[in-house]
Amino acid sequence: MSDIFRAAQGVTVWLGEEDDFTSDAFTVIERIAKIPRAKWTNMPYTGFFDPGGSCYHGTGVEPLSYHHWLGFIAFTNRPWFSRSWVVQELALAQKVSVVCGSRMLLWENLARTIEFIRATRWYHHLSTEKMRHLRELNRCPGVYQRFLASNTKFGLEPVYLNSTRNALQAYEKGGNKGAPSLRLLVDTHRHTNATDPRDKVYAFLGLASRTSSSANQIEPNYETSTRQVYIDAACSLLRTYGNLYLLSHVQDRSLTKTKGLPSWVPDYSVPLSPYPLDFRGYCNWSACGHMKWMPPKDVTLLDRGLLPVQGFHIDTIAETGVMPHEATDAGEPWASIVNMVSNLPNPYPLLPLKGAPISRIDVLWRTLTTNTYARQHPAPPECGALFIDYILNLQIRHRLRPWSSSDSEFQPHSTPLSVLTNPDWRRLIESEPSDSPYNISSYRRRLTALVENMLSSNSYTPIDLAQLHHDIENGSGKMRRVFRTSDMMLLGTGPKALRVGDEVWILGGGKVPCILQPVKDREGAGTGPGMQHRLVGEAYVHGLMHGDPSRFGRELQSTVLI
């Protein structure tokens, strides 16, 4: 099929019949495609929420309404965009026409719209969960009333489709870069759907670079079980690259569907959530320093589902935070985090590789964002002031929640504050030294200014916190569980499935720390030598993400992941 698509003069993509949203979607594509690339940098991140559309001035196009953008969200959520086999259909075609009902457009125009959304980072705002609260849509939802009640967002499927097409087109035309590797393709298109789960690997073999041995080691065979296909793919990638990058692409254990899969093998049949830390920006994580992974001498171990690794057991998890889906009220997750941080030494026990000791508040917001802001690492110090505004807004929201709701009249006694969980931010901030930018005096001044701004300005909105909120949501929030370690008193985030007693390791050949669960009572004894663990997932631990791990004075150990 890949040869057929390469040879075709053109490919026509059929997305289905038109619906009530198609016209708005085409309006977005037609207008955005006309904006010169040179003007994209003038479109501010928060410009999406400008009701007057002033950010469009000077672009030569009419402003777009929220209704238009809702139509675009619906359009890009059509099933075609998320199918595994359409990747090669789109990526290899010389010319692509997209047809929806009686309407047609060239892929190039849709591609420019996708690239614009990516460049401006407006994809952060394109979700019904966020847009349903906008006043304009509350007053007049139009045909989108039911759609707004859904949890639909502009996914990354179109973005990755377009990226792969750009890479393959450049390669086919004799560009300097080679074809994408199998690793890049299966990782990038992990979110796609396939009727046969084995196609989550097989669908990308025809696109992958043949100079990389991983693609050559896999031969499609539909007599092979899904479990074995995924093990074979993981083994091939490990042998090809000689590092443990693969471990960051193992899904949270609660999502695994393929039975009998070793803990270190990604289940490609399910979406990867949360995205690996490597996707957070230009971070260049280097937790393992120059320590390499040593492949086993017994080449059959990997094929048997056993992965020997070497590294340092840094610490053990002593306390974990409450996730939002586990909470009885909105304040509980934050209360558990604040209590955890209050148990940390002040200043933080691990000094940065460069710079002075940092306070617990600094450690908190840097951990919650994985020390990344708008894909910038390390996050700039100004984020600390934004974080104070963020928690002040959180506090006001938590305190006002029992007094009123969107579907009832003002009810000052509907839910007593005493039965809700309110994070003790004040106690944490009072413990800051007087020379800290987060000391209690600064906090009071900021609180006063914020409340006055709310009361005196009809246009107050915490829109400046949108980027920080996005980074917290993806760095921790609903995605990762916050934890504290026992001996070194370190703060970190890891998979939802982690629990007290799990261990923080830095493994040779691993860019980031890992959470490992010890296999007790020799569970599975006889399947491999020595100590054994199960992989829980990757972790961000503040202070461990860069540098030589031998600096912690731990003994180098070997274990087997099963």
Image: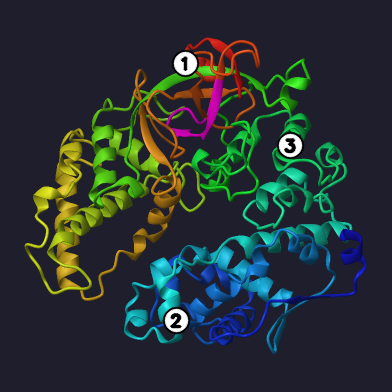
The percent position of residue 281, horizontal first and vertical second, equals: 55, 47
Q: What label does residue 348 carry, if any?
A: none
Q: What label does residue 228 carry, if any?
A: 3
The percent position of residue 449, horizontal first and vertical second, equals: 17, 59
Tell us which disc is closer to us: 1 or 3: 3
Would you say 287 lies left or right of 102 here? left
Q: Which residue is mark 2?
A: 144
Would you say 153 lies left or right of 338 here? right
Q: 10 Å neighbourhood of mark 2: few (<14), some, or many (≥20)?
A: some
Tag 1 secondary structure: helix
- Foreground of the two, 135 or 252: 252
- Foreground of the two, 38 or 475: 475
Tell us which disc is closer to us: 1 or 2: 2
Separation of marks 3 and 2 at Cα, in angstroms: 45 Å
Q: Which residue is mark 1?
A: 552
Sooner in the amino-acid sequence: mark 1 or mark 2: 2
